[in-house]
Image (tube, helix red, strand yellow):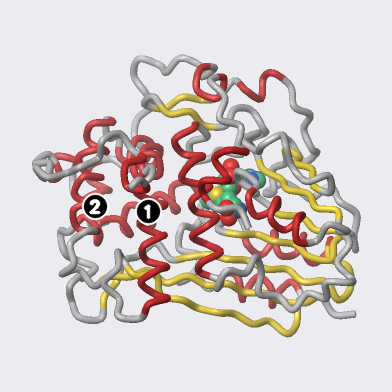
Amino acid sequence: MASPSDAKATSPRSPKNEKTASPEPASGPAPLLDAEAATAAGILPASHWADVPEDDNDDDGASTIGSIASSTASLTSTIFQYREHHGRTYHGDIGNAEGWEPNDNRHLDSMDIAHHCFTICTGGKLFLSPLDKKKVQKVVDIGTGTGMWAIDFADEFPHAEVIGTDITPIQPKWVPPNLKFELDDCNQEWTWPENTFDFINMRMLVGVIQDWYAIFREAYRCCKPGAYVESMGSSCHFISDDGSITPDSASALAQWGKIWIEGGKAFGRTFDVYSEDVQRKGMEEAGFVDIEFKDMVIPVGVWHPDKDAAERGWWWKVTLEADLEGYLNYICQSLLGWKPEETNAYCAHVRKEWNDPKNHGYVMARVAWGRKPE
Ligand SMILES: C[S@@+](CC[C@H](N)C(=O)[O-])C[C@H]1O[C@@H](n2cnc3c(N)ncnc32)[C@H](O)[C@@H]1O
């Protein structure tokens, strides 16, 4: 399995990746949520975070670790003309698939670490579905990101044909011979014929899927009889059992959930996959059977007495802190109209609270899997 440091060596961290963005307009569009609506939703104004904690140690990012249309698009040069928001780049021109995650090098590093984090969450396994290794011939990883899961899966299943899809070409070129990456918008009708795959993986597509029911219908159609679909998703709310984080407090971590919930409403894609239970409901409605799921606590930081939970919390923190500003930049700008320095100030408060051992917060995550009947 690739460790984050292995992953860095194989990802396409080219200068091109950061230099071909279209110029940002002098003044952006009006925020999706005006000040009145943001207040009504319980979101504090940017000025609330202006007093940046003195000991904020974000050196520029990666400090913490150191320590289309419906058809598949060909990779044309226009694909590399990324959108730019406040100095960060986002994917360019596949249909209307508006991505909220940057696709620049700093964010790709965070995605690579996320792969390690998510596999830690599943006990070091790439999947929890009961796959019969001898029978797995064709597999797709939807929204593959930097492709680390697909690479590891292709290595583990050298006789299977593996496809990784995404809307943005951030995958490495040197990959196992049984793996290929394709540019594809998963929110469009899938182009594969019915009964194509033995396994469909959809990991952490929070804020990506427009209609979870439609996605699982497509997955059902494209699964062979007996094939499995698997999805990992999470909540966006930090909660606690001892009152150290309460939903209506003015803390940065309590505000986090509100920002993502309102962002989800504005963009028409939920960031609270766990609470909305869309994995189970979507699989059930599509016709999958033997649906099982594993829920897990992801602690904020390493306070949790259980060693495995603490390890999950550590890696979740390392993943997000590798590019906290990148995760928040687009949503804070387009939803709330925040300037980069305002988003950065808010991030400093999030980091401070995240690293405060008095905060016993956590988010919930779920891996769900189901089988298409024979
Ligand atoms: C949070 S990342 C998850 C990456 C990967 N699945 C993992 O678990 O490491 C979400 C990915 O979905 C991709 N994405 C966003 N919108 C998409 C769409 N409409 N179709 C396919 N991929 C999309 C993003 O570019 C990003 O790489």
Q: Is residue 364 visible?
A: yes
Residue 303: image x %, image y %?
26, 72
In the image: residue 242, left or right of residue 189: left
Question: Taking 28 as reference, is 188 above or below it?
Answer: below
Decide which of tag 2 and tag 1 comes sooner along the chain.
1
Instruction: Name the residue located 51 percent from the left edge and 25 percent from the top edge.
Output: 83
- Say how many tags the image has: 2
Q: Residue furthest bottom?
A: 290
- The quarter of the displayed image where residue 332 is located: top left
Amino acid type at circle 2 is Val
Q: Residue 210: in sight, yes or no?
A: no
**In this orientation, which residue lies closer to the viewer: 65 or 370?**
65
Judging depth in this view, the residue of 190 and 64 nearest the camera is 64
Q: Secondary structure at mark 2?
A: helix
Residue tagged 1: 318
- Please tell me the numbered disc located at residue 14: none
Q: Tell me where residue 68 appears, x and y as whole percent.
A: 72, 34
Residue 294 position, x and y percent, is: 55, 79
Residue wearing tag 2: 350
- How far apart are labels 2 and 1 at the CA level? 13 Å
